[in-house]
């Protein structure tokens, strides 16, 4: 395996990334071991250090790839060509389903918050990824405001944090919430009900204030 991957650096990097993503998602930054990542990737540890420097650099790379993945999928939603209300519906639907289908993303974020964003603070790439998306949110909200469908002066950053939070909290706490309330909140029916509720909550907030 080591000889084969040495001749194909891009494949080697991808093997390392997949192994590191799994290891960091399962054990967090503190629990992950470079030896284990190398073993999962089927390479020797020296090759891992050759490509990624150290454990800190590798964890940051995994975080950057995770953010890059969700931003890339968001771009494909084509929100700028949808009506404001449809754009919001699509965004909420996508955000909820993405978090559900990519639990490793939530685990990475949970872990990085334990370290107070110590690794993300070093990344210019992640900040640059978010700037165009905030502008896109601003455009959707302004179009809705101009059409009289949305309230005035909605902060696009606050708006996006709220969209993410209504999906994130439910899914990241689904087992404890299911136990506490005696409901199987991870069932297909419960997930559909929650998604519809999230859409109603977000659109309800955006409606113009009466009077």
Image (cartoon, rainbow, N blue to C red):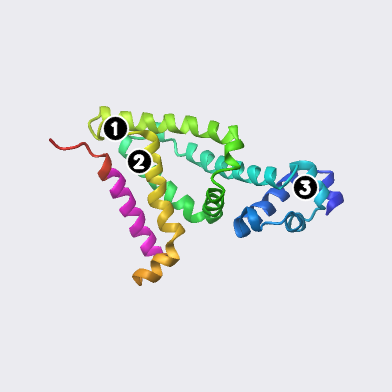
Residue drawn 45% across the image and 39% down it: 77
Q: Main secondary structure of the magenta part?
A: helix
Which quarter of the rendering shows the N terminus?
Answer: bottom right
- The label on residue 88 is 2
As helix, strand or loop, the secondary structure at mark 3 comes to: helix
| Sooner in the amino-acid sequence: mark 1 or mark 2 | 2
Q: Are marks 2 and 3 in contact (CB under 8 Å)?
A: no
Distance (Cα) linking label 1 and label 2: 10 Å
Q: Classify 10 Å Cα crowding around label 2: few (below 14), some (14-19), many (20 and above).
A: many
Provide residue 60's location: percent of width, then percent of height: 64, 43
161 in the magenta segment: no
The residue where tag 3 is placed is: 48
- The label on residue 94 is none
Distance (Cα) linking label 3 and label 1: 49 Å
Count of all numbered marks drawn on residues in the image: 3
Residue drawn 50% across the image and 34% down it: 130
Query: Which stretch appears magenta?
Result: 188-203
Q: Classify 10 Å Cα crowding around label 3: few (below 14), some (14-19), many (20 and above).
A: many
Which quarter of the rendering shows the C terminus?
Answer: top left
| Sooner in the amino-acid sequence: mark 2 or mark 3 | 3
The residue where tag 1 is placed is: 144
Q: Classify 10 Å Cα crowding around label 1: few (below 14), some (14-19), many (20 and above).
A: many
Left or right: where 47 falls relative to 211 = right
| Sooner in the amino-acid sequence: mark 3 or mark 1 | 3
């Amino acid at each position: 395996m080591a000889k084969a991957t040495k001749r194909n650096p891009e494949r080697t990097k991808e093997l390392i990334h997949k192994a590191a993503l799994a290891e960091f998602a399962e054990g967090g930054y503190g629990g992950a071991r470079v030896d284990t990542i190398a073993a999962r990737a089927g390479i020797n540890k020296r090759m891992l250090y050759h490509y990624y420097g150290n454990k800190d650099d590798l964890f940051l790379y995994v975080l950057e790839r995770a953010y890059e993945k969700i931003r890339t999928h968001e771009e494909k939603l084509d929100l700028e060509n949808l009506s404001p209300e449809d754009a919001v519906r699509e965004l909420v639907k996508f955000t909820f389903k993405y978090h559900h289908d990519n639990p490793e993303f939530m685990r990475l974020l949970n872990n990085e918050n334990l370290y107070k964003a110590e690794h993300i603070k070093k990344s210019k790439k992640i900040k640059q990824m978010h700037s165009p998306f905030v502008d896109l949110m601003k455009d959707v909200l302004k179009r809705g405001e101009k059409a009289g469908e949305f309230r005035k002066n909605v902060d696009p950053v606050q708006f996006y944090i709220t969209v993410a939070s209504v999906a994130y909290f439910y899914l990241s706490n689904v087992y404890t919430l299911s136990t506490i309330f005696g409901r199987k909140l991870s069932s297909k029916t419960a997930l559909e009900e929650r998604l519809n509720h999230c859409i109603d909550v977000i659109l309800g907030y955006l409606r113009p204030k009466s009077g």
